[in-house]
Structure formats: C-alpha cells, structure tokens
Image (cartoon, helix red, strand yellow):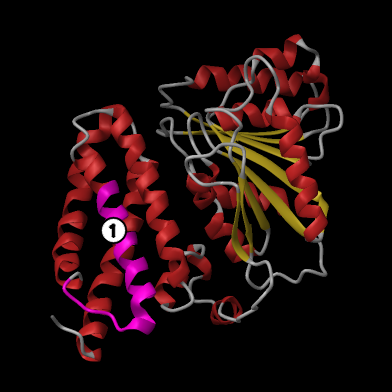
Amino acid sequence: MASNDDDLLAGITELAPRLLTTMEAFEQVQRNMHPSRLDQMAEFISPFAADLTQTFDTFQALTFPEHLAKFGQHLTQATTYSLRACDGIINSGGDTLAAMKAMRAQARAQEKLYPTANILTPISQYFLELPQRDNQALLEKLNIDRPGEKVGILNADNDRDTRGGFSLYIPEYLDSSQPAPLVIALHGGTGHGRDFIWSWLREARTRGFMLLSPTSQQDTWSLMGEELDLPILLHMVEFVAKDFALDRQHILLTGMSDGGTYTLVAGLQAESPFTHLAPFSGVLHPEVSMNGNIKYAKDRNIYLIHGTHDWMFPIETAYMAQSELEAAGANLTFRPIEGLSHTYARTENQAVLSWFLG
C-alpha cells in the first residue's frame, strides 16, 4: 500500500476539499429540508456524495505514519459520517425519520473533523463564518497552543448514550480576564447537546463568545409535568461563571423546536438570568399564559424565528405568539422566514447575534 509522503499529501489534498464541499452542500439540504422535498434534496446531494466516495476509496488505501495516524483517523471518521449523512437523504424514500438521522450524522462529521482544524487551514476556515474565512489574524490566533488551559470543546457527562450533561465551547483565543457573552443553545425533541453545539460553534469561534449546549434530562425538555431541566440549566450557567469571566448583560438562551418552546418557558421566569431569548421554530407554551409567567415578557428582549412552511408548528402559532408577547410588552423582533420548513434556520444566526451583541 502507498505510504510515502507524496502519496499522503496527494491523498489529503484530494480528499479534504471534497469533504468540505460535501459538508457545505449538506448544509443547503438542512436549510431546505421538508418532507415534500426529500426527493429533490436527494438529487441535489447525490453528485457530491459520489465524488467524495470515489476519492475516499483511494484515501483509505493510504498508510499513515504513527505521528499522523490520529490525523488520518479523524479525516476517515469525518468522511464516513459525512457520507452516512448523504446516504440518509439519498435513500430516505421520503422517510422524515431517516432524514433526521442524517442530520445527526452531519453533526458527528463535524465533531470528528474539528480536531484537525489546527492542522489544515481550509478546515479551520470551514469552522468560521464566511466573511471571516480569510482573516489571517484570526486564523493565527486560533492556532496558538495553550496547553493546560480550558479552551476548545469540553464535554461534561455528555456522551450520546447519556442525558443531562452538557458540551461547552470556549474559544481557543479567549482572554479569560475579560467578561465574555454566553450563548446557550437548546436542542429539539429527542436531540442531544453534543450534536446541537455545531449549530452555533462556527459563530462562537469567529466572534469569541462562550457556547453552552446542554442535553435535556429526558428525551425532551420539561414541557409537561415536573420541571426537571431549569434548576440544572441555572446551575450550568453558574458553573461557567465560576471558571470563566461571564458578561451577565449578554446571556442568550436559544433553541430549536422543543428547545425553542422551552426557551420561552425557562426564559419567562421571575429570576431569569437570560438577558435575551431567541426561539427557533417553537411555540409559546399555553402554560406560560396559564401560570401568569407571560408578565415576565415585559421589556424582555425576544427574537422570534419561524418558517412559513413549518409542517410541525404551522406559522399561525408564531403569529399567535407574536400577539401575546407584544401585548405583554416584550421587546420583540419577529422573523417569519419565507419557505423555511421545520428545520434550523442557521442563516439567521448572524442576524440574531447582531441583535444580541449590538
């Protein structure tokens, strides 16, 4: 089998750009996800998957020397998950559950790829917001080695077969002496914080804010019955504040679907530490009005995002939430997004951050 440096360089040079291109293309699949569009999305992603598969077959024949073995392993695992994500769409047969599993495979492809960001510049650029990908000063800051410091992605009791832990991202260049904003991102029903962190990591890495992605205590957040998640969520905020300088004037709670619904449940409380709320594709839970907590929406900064083609929570639910929140005196920004289904509006992150960070 091939093992010399030239073959390795050629193999990496062939694979990496195709992998990144496929992952970028898959983000378009996520953005346009709708049960009625699965066949169209399969047709769109198929050429990317075919090209990546062909290159990957050659790459797998390479032998990496010991000092590069882990790097090769990460690339192999990331590509495997990326192809699994594509396959989940291509062979979904219109099955929405299969498409959701494909989304999770895409998150795991990013998780496996991220450790190589400080080795290959194009991969580091992939994990930045598009306007900053040629920012050489930022790229250099991200490559500074800080051994022994708590930076990068930290997981606390958050293996995918467990519930109730969290994943935390601390930008590699963060000045720990200066208070930093915190974004808390809540996954959807049956989701996991270790997957959902990738919905915001690119922005956190670019702009230098801390990112917390918890996992609910049960399959979803405490929307019915006993409240299990809020005390733990508040404890997590204080855990971050204990180890890192926290800007308490900028704590954003956001989430998708059930996470969006729970954003309003947890955020509209008497002693809520969350200064800004940004629910994506959720609903205003009836309990918020029934228990009187809607009054805590007064003067609260809320950014409400919903798709006009949402098949799970129709857009009418968002208009109802808009009416109730405005009547309660919220500082509300409402963004109905034309054509968006019940999927994460990743392209709205920049606007939310401009609103949040001013």
Q: Percent position (x, y) of residue 72?
A: 32, 73
The mark total stands at 1
Q: Relative to residue 10, is residue 32 depicted above or below?
A: above
Closest to the observer, 295 or 323: 295
Residue at 14% in and 71% down? 58
Mark 1: amino acid? Thr
Which residue corresponds to mark 1?
22
Q: Percent position (x, y) of residue 291?
A: 78, 12
Q: Which span of residues is magenta-colored? A: 61-85
Q: Relative to residue 326, is residue 249 depicted above or below?
A: below
For the stretch drawn in magenta, the main secondary structure is helix
Q: Percent position (x, y) of residue 77?
A: 32, 61
**Can residue 323 be seen in the rendering of this structure?**
yes
Position of 336 with respect to 328 (left or right) is left
Q: Quadrant of residue 253?
A: top right
Considering the image in quadrants, where does the N terminus appear? bottom left
Position of 143 with respect to 87 (left or right) is right
